[in-house]
Amino acid sequence: MDKLSSLAKFKASCPFLGRTKTSTLRTLCTSSSPRYPSLSKLTEKATECPVMGPALQLRSHQMVAGYASVAGNAEFNKIHQHKGVFPVPTSAADAQKCPHAAKALAAARMAEDLAKAKEKKTAKAAEAAAGPSTSKAAAGACPFHAEGASKQTKVGFDYEQFYVNELEKKHQDASYRYFNNINRMANKFPIAHTGNPKDEVEVWCANDYLGMGNNPAVLETMHRTLDTYGHGAGGTRNIAGNTGMHLALEQEIASLHRKPGALVFSSCYVANDATLATLGSKLPGCVYFSDSMNHASMIQGMRHSTAKRVIFKHNDLEDLEAKLQQYPKETPKIIAFESVYSMCGSIGPIKEICDLAEQYGALTFLDEVHAVGLYGPRGAGVAEHLDWEAHKRAGQSPDPIKGSIMDRIDIITGTLGKAYGAVGGYIAGSTDFVDMIRSYASGFIFTTSLPPANMAGARASIVYQKEYLGDRQLQQLNVRNLKAKFTALDIPVVPGPSHIVPVLVGDAALARAASDTLLSEHGVYVQAINYPTVARGEERLRFTVTPGHNVEQIARLATAVDKVFTQLDIPRASEWAARGGRAGVGIAGAQPVEPIWTDEHLGITDGTAPRQLHAGDARHVDPRAVRVVRERFEDLLGPVVETPASTKVVVPHGMTIPTPPAMHAPTPIEAAA
Ligand SMILES: Cc1ncc(COP(=O)(O)O)c(C=O)c1O
């Protein structure tokens, strides 16, 4: 896109651009500033702007190291490729080699220069007019500069500089995070638009693993709850924010995990943090045994507890046992681990950890965040999946199955924000454990509870997935398909038994460049995962596939990734093997990793597997599961009233809802209209 047409977008919002003729703008763009020859006159002008000036000044460091994302990834990559500068520079030293980043750096320096010059000038004038101590007046009349100047002249610690220095560290070790603007559209799943509503991309890394964020039964329930109970919860659980929707959700979760109790938190980050912090600080002399790849929320909770924390090697039972042996049986111990590790796709040895816990007198704390909704006949997670037949036989009974793995786990935590497509997190366990956390955990007590409509949506989602296996099966079939396609193209998939498809890149800048190129040239959005989320040298792209991705989209994705690997010269699986392997890729003599969804689970053996979607196919919405969801909410929301008008129900594109429902009772606004 040429510079003038990009500027035209801002004519409505910028008074300078709005009133300046295009011919003048062209001249300003194409002539160099006499003072800073590497910059245009227009850039120099921008530094005088009350909005752009301070912004350029403040972001100078970011512009050096991260100019790519400040400029907007897609456009930036195109410009660089056109100029033959690709992959993008990431360090300050590299930036000097790049004409664009160097320009940005010069612009930032100039902005600083100008701001300082202006500050001196205004300070002198203000001093002359009102004496030396009027720092506010020194900033002049401009509100932007007034604020900046008052910060700069504050006595004592230089807070702003501190922030800048901290950010600079992030840029230096390439761990500064850039967020893409991605707006997933309910009626076009799995399509999203970027910052520009007309710019559509396919999403290949969302944690809304099953597309429940736009399931029609869930949306219908949420609409009805919103119309009945309004938006916010109105208070903490202790003060006016304890609704029937919260209580029913907790009962549903307890029943899902066949545990006596459950408690909902604002997120599973909060659930993990608050629970581990409370347990570790209350249990006398408690020692945590923590898997080395545990999520930040668990690490934070253990740290907050101040209890001793012993870290064992990822999924290494020998190391765990050796560490457990060092403590007396009487010492309270908690083994904290996950079922599905979301960045590498590995699965914890749950049964074996339960065995060790029993032997050494430890509690088990299992985070099933990336497994709930996705594994097991009812979607209760990997612990349920491992005793498939027993759980299938038990149906929807809330009673524990004695001796089953799920029963042997003391504490299960899960999220409502990933496969269930909602928001919130929870713990499930014994009645007294749940009551103790409810009574002591400040992260639960002192915060406004989540809105009833969210609680209802989450519960509808759990109920739907408890009743319908097809989404889970189809997701896994799609995962198999994508992994097979990547493998055939020598694309290095980190081997794992789960639904996560991590593709090794092995370099932070390359991983980001691959992500940016897929987005700008192929309309594929997949996030690069860099240090500290994964080890340096193990940077990757993390793909997630949903039941809503069709066969053609999967094939197109594999082709796009193949092209980008060639274009950026990213090592293939065979190259990793030649180098001796990394992150499980190309390791000589390694046993193949089998998926934990077998052909029997998927319905391949008995011919009941769901059909993979093709372009234009409607996504299946299960009529029986929809009926059960509606029945579950009758006590609070009443029956869904079928009206003739409801035969034309609008549901997200490509979906059918089996019996025509009234989406929600007319709100007063609709009634008045
Ligand atoms: C393993 C694990 N536990 C807990 C969480 C936090 O869950 P939530 O997103 O509900 O806060 C995450 C989030 O990504 C996670 O990956």
Image (spheres, rainbow, N blue to C red):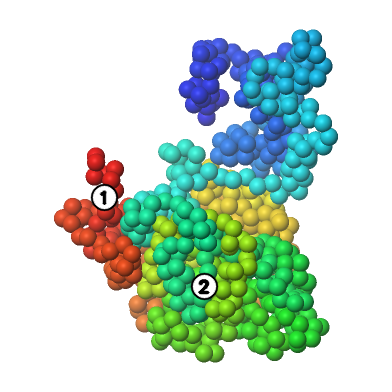
Using a 10 Å C-alpha cutoff, classify the residue at mark 1 as few (fewer than 14 neighbours), some (14 to 19) or many (20 or more). few
Q: CA distance from mark 1 to mark 2?
A: 34 Å
Which of 19 and 190 lies nearest the eye of the viewer? 19
- Residue 463 rendering spot, x and y as whole percentages: 39, 70
Q: How many dots with numbers?
A: 2
> Residue 92: where, in percent of width, then height?
76, 38
Secondary element under disc 1, as helix, strand or loop, is loop
* Image point (66%, 88%), residue name: 358
Q: In the rendered view, does 600 fall on the left or right side of 363? A: left
Q: Residues within 10 Å of mark 2 (few under 14, many from 20)?
A: many
- In this figure, which residue is indicated by the disc labeled 2? 262
243 to 160, vertically: above or below: below
The answer to which image quadrant residue 492 occupies is bottom right
Picture residue at 47% right of the left edge, 22% below the top: 12
The earlier-in-sequence mark between 1 and 2 is 2
Residue 332 pos. (x, y %): 73, 81
Ligand 1 closer than 8 Å to the CB at disc 1?
A: no
Which residue occupies the extreme left position in the image? 644
The image quarter containing residue 631 is bottom left
Q: Amino acid at mark 2?
A: Ala
**Which of the two residues, 656 or 574, is positioned nearer the viewer here?**
656
- Callout 2: helix, strand or loop? strand
The residue shown at (26%, 64%) is 639
Residue under circle 1?
A: 666
Q: Relative to residue 98, is residue 471 depicted above or below?
A: below
Check the image and report above or below for 47 versus 566.
Answer: above
Residue 138 in sight in this render: yes
Q: What residue sits 43% from the left and 72% below the top?
A: 252
